[in-house]
Image: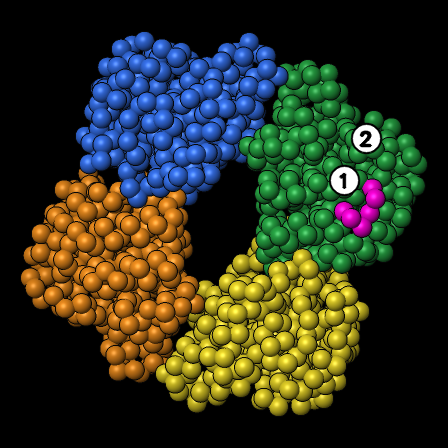
Chain colours: A orange, B blue, C green, D yellow
Amino acid sequence: MGKEHFAGIFPYLVTPLDDEGRLKEEVLAGLVDHLIRKGVHGFTPLGSTGEGAYLDWPTKKRAVELVVEAAGGRVPVIAGVNNLTTVGAVREAVETERLGVDGILVVLPTYFPVSDRQVISHFRTVARAVSCPVVLYTNPTFAMWDFTIPALKQLAEEPNICYLKDASGNIGKLMSIVTALSDRIKIFSASAHVPTFVFMLGGVGWMAGPACLIPEQSVALYELARQKKWEEALELQKTLWPLNVAFQKYSLAACVKAGLEMQGFPVGSPLPPQKQLDGEGREAVRKILRNIGAL
Amino acid sequence: MGKEHFAGIFPYLVTPLDDEGRLKEEVLAGLVDHLIRKGVHGFTPLGSTGEGAYLDWPTKKRAVELVVEAAGGRVPVIAGVNNLTTVGAVREAVETERLGVDGILVVLPTYFPVSDRQVISHFRTVARAVSCPVVLYTNPTFAMWDFTIPALKQLAEEPNICYLKDASGNIGKLMSIVTALSDRIKIFSASAHVPTFVFMLGGVGWMAGPACLIPEQSVALYELARQKKWEEALELQKTLWPLNVAFQKYSLAACVKAGLEMQGFPVGSPLPPQKQLDGEGREAVRKILRNIGAL
Amino acid sequence: MGKEHFAGIFPYLVTPLDDEGRLKEEVLAGLVDHLIRKGVHGFTPLGSTGEGAYLDWPTKKRAVELVVEAAGGRVPVIAGVNNLTTVGAVREAVETERLGVDGILVVLPTYFPVSDRQVISHFRTVARAVSCPVVLYTNPTFAMWDFTIPALKQLAEEPNICYLKDASGNIGKLMSIVTALSDRIKIFSASAHVPTFVFMLGGVGWMAGPACLIPEQSVALYELARQKKWEEALELQKTLWPLNVAFQKYSLAACVKAGLEMQGFPVGSPLPPQKQLDGEGREAVRKILRNIGAL
Amino acid sequence: MGKEHFAGIFPYLVTPLDDEGRLKEEVLAGLVDHLIRKGVHGFTPLGSTGEGAYLDWPTKKRAVELVVEAAGGRVPVIAGVNNLTTVGAVREAVETERLGVDGILVVLPTYFPVSDRQVISHFRTVARAVSCPVVLYTNPTFAMWDFTIPALKQLAEEPNICYLKDASGNIGKLMSIVTALSDRIKIFSASAHVPTFVFMLGGVGWMAGPACLIPEQSVALYELARQKKWEEALELQKTLWPLNVAFQKYSLAACVKAGLEMQGFPVGSPLPPQKQLDGEGREAVRKILRNIGAL
């Protein structure tokens, strides 16, 4: 499989759950179909927004299976692998690959702090256990570690580690990564970043929760970026930005799930004790979606 | 079951694992027996040091079963319940209670941040699912939340929430908790605190990893505290303190596991990607244990 | 001058200011006299509570002169030296010594971060510029540095660096300092710590804002500690603790100044943009002082 | 004076000092002249890089006087006002305005934390004390506060508060500011940001230390941005980026001063206890400047 084929808008899919925490399979399948019709270029189930950290393996496995099936080869699926131990992450990665995904995104949550050496070893071991492309993920706001440039350099030597999704929001850090590693690691934007700028830096796509709610607008943004119409892209970006702000103010999964409910997808609530969207947050999200034309 | 019966030295048991991450059952049983003979007053398997955040449920379940069996009713067992979701924590708590434990210690790891309301709801829901006493646990250094006094006041109204283990190391916070809640919540010291001072504040015991390595000395410290021989307790404390310092400098589980290996218990290493103790750390731990007379 | 003669309760004196920021000299002199009559063992003008970071040199100089004069040799005066540059701190230290103080407390505020080497160099250079005893001060919550044990070891080699006031509130850190350095550095408690425990660790006194408001109670606490009546000291401590909590919840100088106003000392307000005590804070402080019997 | 006339490259001037901390007047005048000949559009003496937090008022006053004189009306001068108290900042601001500057940049260092209300009051009071345009400055990495959007909205109502220099490095925050306030506040980039992106967001210029070392390249970057040649700007940006990285790795003033020494301007060292550039840092800066063609 070529390393270069992931690009564009990859919604960080929510995982629809009923009140008992069971997967709402039809809702997920319907959402996948809807988003493909809206033009998205791929899917990332079980990322942060997908509550990958909170779900048990049978639910995660079934969610990935369903997304692969519903996508039906029309667009690639890059599934999240989110496990505190290396051995657990390897097991999840191997089983996930068997489900027919096109790539995996590896998230490393932590309980105790880890150092560079542990971080490198974890991602390298997981990458070597699969043959599909691997997206490295970092979010130093939530986890107690971040990739250093030397760590990324070592990891980029693995033939199937070819992408990075950096959710730090630190555009200077991304600039440093691009100047040091642009020939070996491709960047996906997170919604903590301004995607237009990540595209300008050579970013190949946008993987984040908002694309579940505003797929058309996200695809339009990507198209403008691909045509290097930077100013138009930025103007569009500005109209979409309030959604990013809401995501940071309120809780991520709660925002996306509530917005999808408003759009007619009964995806349920995030698993407690995650924050639920309260009345004020709900009104804010509703107003923003209306302004964007997504409701 | 009375609320008041937990007191004294409760080693935060390590979970002995082989290179494949499988439980070394005989080693664990032997360690339990050894520590009882050294005078400890109870056990806390699956705390932080017990890698409760890193193990899968079958391993956790078997570890608790074994500790309950090996303790054989000689001392109480308070098992850790460590789960990111409330529904998962409830399930673990209920199954753990069925294994015959005398209490549970509830740890709330996080991926996304949580607020007071979520924290209260999580601990309350878990407590209500069991009938055994519950120990609240907080470590704001590792998790992204801490108990506020108002949250503790609400939680203390649950009839079976009767203990708190605060691993913040902030003695002023503990003083505030004691002045506000001493009649309703009993305190266990963590090794981030100076146990002698926690005992002076009315603390009923010490739950932490070091007691695995220095059970006799820990029991002696507790006895001095019980006899209100505060100065002697503090003198003993000073001789033991370098071990606490090493635990904070190097990684917790790695320190305890390495020290136990030196003492003849082949407990293995912490699960990657947790930090392993390097040569320098190993020498430091060895020297400290020798100075204390624990090697 | 002997290194060992500072001990007991040293109120961190506020600096009384009128609305134009001018020193209210008589109020300061009256406060000093009042506190001596209440039994305090010394004074620390120009500490954090004394707004040492906010005042210009002429005001600071006049405040120290006045305190030295009002104390009249009855108790020692240890004046704060608070300057961002080493050359400025040296100048202040030398001029402060000439004003007849018995010692200086050196505070290092920062704009850019500093490392161990810079910290050591700053305190050493200031200490060598004077012949009086020096108290090292650290508050890692507000400044962006903290003393490491190796840094303290180097600084303790200076003959006139003989005291440390650690305002971190981390009792474990203090335990580490005491086990490593108790023969060479004497400790003063800050109000972020529980003074009773600092006394148990060998602390020689308490330097902090609350002693301005509750001098008798602070002296009583010290006396109990001197007589090693630890449990009685701790019982007294518990009754005083709500004041420490208020200090941390509301702003330090604002709390002490408001409380002194209630006690009849028209010390004015902290210099803006420091926080002023609002109505709610004022009520909280009033209630606490009444409960303690200090109003 | 119109509010809108500041734009382009404003070097954050270093303050040349000899070993006794005295201003090297001729060096400063020479540097100003050199930078004007290299095309810069204005000067900001006494910013962070200018050690505005570390210098006494006579030195600051003389530095501003000299820069105004050396600039001779050829380009505007926006001088830093850096004072912990509002009354001190007002005094500095008024006296600075009298020295003939075209604007002031207000920096608020802190000792104790401040809240929104204090922040608003400080900047508003300073702005009302002068008639020249005011640049708001924030650097949440070093100070313990940051502008909230509501605070900026209130401050933007002051007729002479017309600019913001945000040194947070958080491009998402800047995007939020621009979407909320672009009609009322103009943005200057800091070197913690990627200036090209700030220009795309409508930023009017770049105020930072690196422009002292690479004035021609900075001006070229600005020109490309003005012509909306975004991709060329970003390509140029990438070649300059290693200098930003060095500034963050080593200390700011130390980097700029060392680089200027290499370029033949004997500006001396930053005032201790600020970090000095060590041999390794010096080599890194030298290599980077050579690669850029600035040495």
- Give the amino acid type for the residue marked by disc 1 in the picture: Pro
Q: Amino acid at mark 2?
A: His
Instruction: Find disc 1 in the rendering and name its residue.
Output: C159
Task: Pinpoint residue A190: horizontal percent, then vertical percent.
Answer: 32, 62
Res B101 quadrant in image: top left
Q: Is residue C75 above or below residue A177?
A: above
Of the 4 image quadrants, the one containing the N terminus of chain A is bottom left
Q: Give the left or right position of residue A141, taking residue C50 as reference.
A: left
Q: Residues within 10 Å of mark 1 (few under 14, many from 20)?
A: some
Can you see residue D142? yes
Residue depicted at 79% across the width and 34% down the height: C3
The reply, left or right, for residue C75 in relation to residue D109 is right
Residue A85, numbered circle: none
Is residue A211 among what the camera can see?
no
Find numbered disc 2 in the image and state the secondary structure of the residue it sits on: loop
x and y percent of residue A77 in the render? Answer: 15, 60
Q: Nearer the viewer, mark 2 or mark 1?
A: 1
Instruction: Find disc 2 in the rendering and name its residue.
Output: C5
Residues tagged by mark 2 and mark 1 found on one chain of the structure: yes
Answer with left or right where residue D225 lies relative to residue A235.
Answer: right
- The CA span between labels 2 and 1 is 14 Å
Say which residue appears at 36% left-offset and 26% top-offset.
B262
Quadrant for the C terminus of chain A in the image: bottom left
Q: Residue at x 50, y 33 (%)?
A: B245
Q: Quadrant of residue A111?
A: top left
Q: State which region is magenta.
A: C127-132
Between residues B143 and B34, which one lies in front from this camera angle?
A: B34
